[in-house]
Image: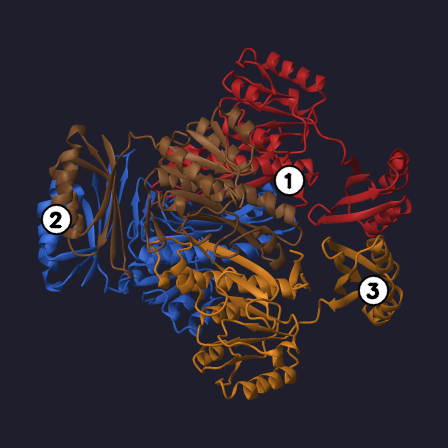
Chain colours: A red, B blue, C brown, D orange
Amino acid sequence: MKTTILINCPDQSGIIYAVTGFIHSHGGNIIYLDQHVDKHSNVFFMRLESDFKDSTSLPAFKEAFNKELAETYDMEWNLYSDDAKPKMAIFVSKYNHCLYDLLSRYKSGELNVDIPFIISNHSTLGDIAQQFGIKFYHIPVTANTKDSAEKEQLRLLKEHQIDFVVLARYMQIVTNTLIEEYPNKIINIHHSFLPAFAGAKPYHAAFDRGVKIIGATSHYVTEDLDAGPIIEQDVTTVSHTHSIQDFIAKGRDLEKIVLSRAIKLHLKRKTMVYNNKTVIFA
Amino acid sequence: MKTTILINCPDQSGIIYAVTGFIHSHGGNIIYLDQHVDKHSNVFFMRLESDFKDSTSLPAFKEAFNKELAETYDMEWNLYSDDAKPKMAIFVSKYNHCLYDLLSRYKSGELNVDIPFIISNHSTLGDIAQQFGIKFYHIPVTANTKDSAEKEQLRLLKEHQIDFVVLARYMQIVTNTLIEEYPNKIINIHHSFLPAFAGAKPYHAAFDRGVKIIGATSHYVTEDLDAGPIIEQDVTTVSHTHSIQDFIAKGRDLEKIVLSRAIKLHLKRKTMVYNNKTVIFA
Amino acid sequence: MKTTILINCPDQSGIIYAVTGFIHSHGGNIIYLDQHVDKHSNVFFMRLESDFKDSTSLPAFKEAFNKELAETYDMEWNLYSDDAKPKMAIFVSKYNHCLYDLLSRYKSGELNVDIPFIISNHSTLGDIAQQFGIKFYHIPVTANTKDSAEKEQLRLLKEHQIDFVVLARYMQIVTNTLIEEYPNKIINIHHSFLPAFAGAKPYHAAFDRGVKIIGATSHYVTEDLDAGPIIEQDVTTVSHTHSIQDFIAKGRDLEKIVLSRAIKLHLKRKTMVYNNKTVIFA
Amino acid sequence: MKTTILINCPDQSGIIYAVTGFIHSHGGNIIYLDQHVDKHSNVFFMRLESDFKDSTSLPAFKEAFNKELAETYDMEWNLYSDDAKPKMAIFVSKYNHCLYDLLSRYKSGELNVDIPFIISNHSTLGDIAQQFGIKFYHIPVTANTKDSAEKEQLRLLKEHQIDFVVLARYMQIVTNTLIEEYPNKIINIHHSFLPAFAGAKPYHAAFDRGVKIIGATSHYVTEDLDAGPIIEQDVTTVSHTHSIQDFIAKGRDLEKIVLSRAIKLHLKRKTMVYNNKTVIFA
């Protein structure tokens, strides 16, 4: 049984030795270890891939870990079994490029997830959902219905036991109704190299400013719009010869790539969040 | 005699034909032509490299161009002889990496300029100036002496007939005293991918925000701090493993490269400014 | 009627003036002009986007152009009407990522083409063709049937009046049977930064060599394997932490992006081929 | 006393635990741990930064490590004290850009090394050495004198107790006379993205092939020309508008950056070599 353990705690001497010894003594073989210390905040981070021969021992392992290590070192930690296939919901609006990209990767087996459904505030992309055989819920959102719409979204997420949500160019602001239930579990793609051009119409703003580089940023959603912990960013060059339409077209490819990379990092448990920043064990 | 002509004017039909015909009929051979139309602003831009057999005819050419073309088409235009070697002044503060880089390029013959002097508000880099045999003026700047310091700077610029100024990590804000005299002729390097992290300490701000990409931007200086027309930008990746010191070290290489590229574009007359943006005929 | 004219000829003085004047005098308005001179080979290249008010005049225009310009300057040239939608055939084998990507772009309206059919030497991707409503021909290829298979392919290309062919990870070598009929009209994607790692299994070779960068290259197919004129290349970083499987996964995204960029350049008539190299008016 | 330990050995269960426990029990505090397993070759790699309060204990530590760990696990390993400043020799020919860059970084304190001398087969760059106050040995190399020249080079390297050698565009092939004495301690910069364009005149070859990307590669020198373990690579885009001279000019910046990055990785003991490949703990 392969597992991934994520740990963070105040830094002190001897943690690596203590944890590796503990896993060793419980029959685990450490395959990979990544470690980081944030010296500003004095926080220790570790990610361990370990193989346990006897998966039935994991509950006892967890209990012992809590007692013998987590309390001593004041750890937050999680153990994930690699055989659990996460459930991912996709929220979209009218743009189809990220949806096509995600569903193509899903169908190819590139993303090891279940996708129980797609939610949209428009009916536009229902055909694509159908083409790929995924359930599609059209939940319109207006200023007046926003609250009830989010409650309906939340009901669906709960009902299907969704593990994390991907906003694949979902052009609506998501509120605390959802964020609190899915902390660091809602992944957004924003079409600029944040913090430049947060908010609406970033390609137009980039064009007006005359930048020579445009970007895309995938981040976990927090209450502050486009200000959550950044998972992944990438950029591409532009010039005076490019119109706003060219910016948008070039940006589409960036958005697809950056979003899918962020999702893969999340799926492999390679992201840890602290102080509104991420540690990415890439 | 090789020349470079830069033209901008309201767009209309027939300009290319008119200009190429005019040059042709005055004994010029067009070697290279770059052209752009800003469809938003309806402005036409053109850059022509031409060879004239008889350099003595250039004054007559200019006069005729003004009468027969510039008035008709409402053109702003300039003709530069490629044998004129521009005079470049460098302003620095305490950081030496951009200065070392520029002087090395200068000594190697990579930059086809004269560098009559370096100005600094500190004496720190005087040794490097001396090492490369360039005159060094130490002009301290405080809140109280800023105005007189800039007047002294301007006096030196005028006295040496400086064509353009490079702020090679000059950590002072330059005011209209200089900007008005050198419009689109003062080139700054800012250590972020503008418009993100304008102002002071961008690497610290980038670190705090947890970005995965840092950048550098070279731009013409205008009254608005770090908001002038962008000439060149580049970026490099960072991760949680990098400290602020690492950001600064990685950024140094970006700054050197981006600044020198911008200077070369300026020297080759490949930059045109319009609406606070640049057309770069790269 | 918008048109694109591509010209190449031996370089000499006055061509730009002659061509722009000719278009002007035939009622054409030049919207964009790109020009290049290959000084090694002394070849002149030009691309003009022009607007003609009266499309019925184009045949006369072409005839006059041939007589008055093409002969004089020894030009090869072509005029394309922008309202003609090119017909593109796709050849695939078993890998689906490029096919998904192309068909998604096609369905989104991002690629302004018709796709009459997909050809494959395997039946694997027939389902995807069906999902997107495109005709799929399964033409098996073995050493013995290669010749007859290519003849069948050629028959289909002719029958459907295909303008150009995209090899979207078609794992077969294409012979002169096809190449001669479609010179500079067969676009391949190779999964390395050519000329490094030409031929089979480039990701394995890159892994064995321990490179820190992998790439993808799109080129026109010629008789020499992976040695045709390069249209577009891009790269991404790798490290010792990446397995061959990781190389392949990272490479997929490169391949998709690079191939689609090359197709777009071809569609916009921004590619010209000379001496086994390309001029790309990007 | 800060130290860096590098270990490689056949992979097996429990190594991390054994090593971290050993360091812990000898009064060392582990600050950073990087680890990698090459699953193809079944080799385990580890890099540890540790702090020992009592530096006088290091000889005993080393002896115990050898007995208790190195033999058991069949380890190759090294311990480096961070207070030892490595001695670096630079070999150059006539090109000055890498030399200027290295000496500027050295003078700025960016490279934590001593540079006892520069060797060149030409006298061209003697002035730069003098300008930066570094000893310069002019050792001409011809086909006939190559052997004696290398012996003289080796004598100087030994005399000055040089730790590693940087070939900063030294245009001569280095033979086993030097390589055997400095295995994985001679760092070269080659001006292409290897394995493309190995050997002489790579920019010319790249130009002829019509690539859209050029690169630079820094690697450890082995007997096989340009085929040693790659430390660092980077690339930049080119187009048909660039002449060979432009390739060379753009390449210079790549070469400088890539070489200096490789040197920094080497200095920080972040490089390990195995099977003609590198593990880079970046």
Task: Say whether residue B194 is visible.
Answer: no
**Mark closer to the observer (2, 1):** 2
Asked if residue D84 lies left or right of residue C160, the reply is: right
Disc nearest the viewer among 1 and 3: 3
Q: Is residue A255 visible?
A: yes
Name the residue that disc number 3 marks. D74
Q: Mark 2 points at which residue?
A: B21
Of B148 and D113, nearer the camera is D113
For label 1, the residue is: A277
Kindly identify which chain the residue marked by label 1 belongs to.
A
Q: Which of D41 and D244 is in front in this view?
A: D41
**C110 or A210: nearer the viewer:** C110
Name the disc covering residue A88, or none: none
Is A105 left or right of B122, judged from the image as shown?
right
Type of the residue with mark 3: Asp
Label 3–label 2 contact, CB within 8 A: no
Lateral position of residue A74 relative to residue C89, left or right = right
Expressed as whole percent of the image width and height from the top left, the position of residue D59 reads 83, 72
